[in-house]
Image (cartoon, grey):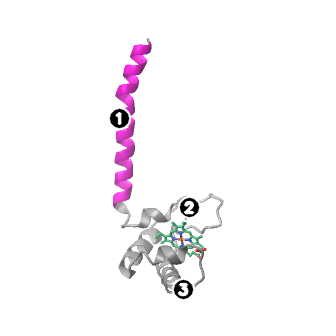
Amino acid sequence: MIHIRILICLLICPLAAAVTVAVSIASAADAPPGASSCSGCHPATAGVATPVPRLAGRDAAQITTAMTEFRTGKRPATVMDRIAKGFTDDETKAIAAFFAAQKD
Ligand code: HEC
């Protein structure tokens, strides 16, 4: 009996892992470079209690302006000034458009 369980697990576990990898590749393909790093701090789903505001569904121009102001130091920040410096204008615009297009 134990052998059968182990055998079933050996068959199913890699399958589950493969599905997980396939799903994450599929969703990562939609996101422009760098966008997935934002959701480490900015919650991807509504209803998450966090002081870091959500980006999904926001106006793209608003995100781009905030990123530019963080980068230039016009807008005070704890971490976003350093993060914003890692992205060019074009990369920031692509990320902003990606989040603006997201719905809940
Ligand atoms: C390490 C955590 C962290 C990561 C990663 C992160 N942010 Fe932030 N973000 C913050 C914090 C904290 C603030 C509030 C300002 C501050 O203290 O820096 C903020 C503020 C912002 C704001 C202003 C929101 C507002 O309404 O005031 C924007 C826009 C923003 N982040 C965009 C991004 C984008 C785009 C990325 C990915 C490229 C990103 N952030 C990655 C932590 C993070």
Q: Residue at x 53, y 81 (%)?
A: 70
Q: Amino acid at mark 3?
A: Gly
Q: Quadrant of the N terminus?
A: top left
Place of residue 49 in the rendered image (x, y in percent of width and height, measured from the top left): 66, 59
Place of residue 103 in the rendered image (x, y in percent of width and height, measured from the top left): 49, 64
The magenta-colored residue range is: 2-29
> Which sits earlier in the primary sequence, circle 3 or circle 2?
2
Mark 2, secondary structure of its residue: loop
Task: Name the residue furthest top.
Answer: 1
Q: Amino acid at mark 2?
A: Pro
Question: Circle 2: is it few (<14), some (14-19), or many (20+) Cα within 10 Å?
Answer: some
Query: Exactly how many numbered labels are in the figure?
Result: 3
Which quadrant holds residue 51?
bottom right
Image-quarter location of ligand 1: bottom right
Q: Is residue 81 left or right of residue 22?
A: right
Report the Cα–Cα distance between label 1 and label 2. Answer: 29 Å
Residue picked out by circle 1 = 15
Magenta residues, dominant SS class: helix
Of the pair 101 and 64, the residue shown nearer to us: 64
Residue picked out by circle 3 = 73
Residue picked out by circle 2 = 43
Q: Is mark 1 within 8 Å of ligand 1?
A: no
Figure check: 41 above or below 11: below
Question: Circle 3: is it few (<14), some (14-19), or many (20+) Cα within 10 Å?
Answer: some
Question: Circle 1: is it few (<14), some (14-19), or many (20+) Cα within 10 Å?
Answer: few
Of the pair 49 and 71, the residue shown nearer to us: 71
> Which sits earlier in the primary sequence, circle 1 or circle 2?
1
**Residue 9 is a magenta residue:** yes
Place of residue 28 in the rendered image (x, y in percent of width and height, measured from the top left): 37, 58
